[in-house]
Amino acid sequence: MMANIVDQHLLQNVAADELARLRRYRTAWEAYHGDFPEPLKALKGRDGKPVAADDNAIVNYARVVVDKGVAFLFGQDIRFELDETGHTPEEEWLAQCWIANGGITTLQKLALNGSICGHAFAKIAPASGRPFPRGIVLDPAYVSVGYDPGDIDTVLWYRIQYTGRDARDELVTYRQIIERDGNVWQIIDQEARGSESWRTINTERWPYTWPPVIDCQNLPLPNEYYGLSDLPEDVLQLNRSINFVLSNLARIIRFHAHPKTWGRGFTADKLQIAIDETIVLPNEHSELRNLEMVSDLSSSIALFERLREALHEVTRVPEVATGKLEHVGSLSGVALQILYQPLIEKTETKRRTYGDLLIELNRRLLALGGYGEEHRGVIHWPEMLPGDPLVERQTALIDKQLGVSSDTLLQQLGYDPDMERQKRAVEQQQLGDAMLEAFDRDDGGGGET
């Protein structure tokens, strides 16, 4: 009896944790889409539209933080390489596979999910009549994970569950359970309609030692399976506080920005004012003055600036990364490194987590393509910071003299060495053909008559 009570209590805790996770996802997505609570109450009609001026000012810093992080991680094309000494058929197949799966756009969607929810999931689907297998970006809210309590990195099962409409426009809840069965994985597809219980549609054994789902933490979070989001609650609260301060500033300015005229010592009907006439007060004791706002709201503006600075510090997205260049002159490479250091460190951490996922994903894609499971490969990431092209090439020439290979230097400059070799070969062939053609013309028309 006691064991049943303990088991029931544990199940309730697991359900509560799962519900809390989904609520965090929803709150973060709402913030990304700019759906913040209104700091000030506005009088609205039955249609929900304001019937008076709405002073609520909503500034969506959450989207700025996420989009800038995704841009630094996958804003430029990355290159996968299996053999760093030459171009192989496996590399060509993998490049075509990524083109068929959306390339960098798919990676940006994966990183966007991870940045907002804290964890990124992708699913591999066999080709099934297509030229390449599919890499499907999964909504983290649809995926639940069961893991070994003694080793949270060992996954025991994945559950993908969502609700949609079938061909008859009826609501159906679909569920796919991918669970470990010894050294292989079993896939169980189920559905439920209305209040009906789950009905198994299909069961199959996945013919590989790895599952068709792959995932990673957005930012490392020890002792937890799900990673850390770019929009935790403290960041969202900072954004709400900024909206509150700006909204109050907007209301104060609306009521007090314009001076109000007041007078005494006369009645209103005795005061005559025309556009082209002089104001004449009825007696010597009459007064007419303007009531103006004494404060320039500097303290409120200073609070807004401090909150904004705090948000940039906490999220590790410096203001210079969002285009703010006040009081900034010509910057050297070292100065740029210092200014961007928080975002660079954050992006380098993400390159480790997402990089491990991509290397393993490529290995699995190649296995589905019939190229075996032994390919690990490397990722060539682009430079994060803008540089001086002249200085970069001068440095590359010095490195070349020190013995650095041409392949490495071309990669650092953003070129594909294998592609450049192919282009040079084509150019040399075209040059040789042109020389032969010129020689043939000279030989044909240069003889004696």
Image (cartoon, helix red, strand yellow):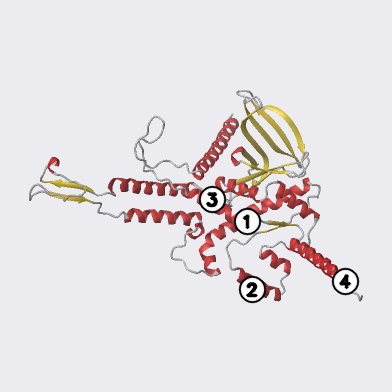
CA separation, marks 2 and 3? Answer: 35 Å
Left or right, 38 with respect to 287, comes to right
Real-space CA distance between mark 1 and mark 2, rounded to the nearest whole angstrom: 23 Å
Q: Label 3 is placed on what type of residue?
A: Val
Labels 4 and 3: the sequence-earlier one: 3
Residue 394 disc label: 2
Which residue is outermost to the left?
284
- Give coordinates of residue 356: x percent, y percent: 67, 53
Residue 66: mark in rendering: 3
**369 with respect to 161 (left or right):** right
* In the foreground, 234 or 5: 234
Residue under the point 46% across and 53% down: 311
Tag on residue 445?
4
Residue 129 can be seen, yes or no: yes
Q: Which residue is mark 1?
A: 76
Alpha-carbon span between mark 1 and mark 3: 16 Å
Q: CA distance from mark 2 to mark 4?
A: 47 Å
- Residue 431 is situated, as x and y percent measured from the top left of the image, at 80, 67
- Mark 1 or 4: in front is 4
Packing grade of label 4 (10 A; few <14, some 14-19, many >=20) is few
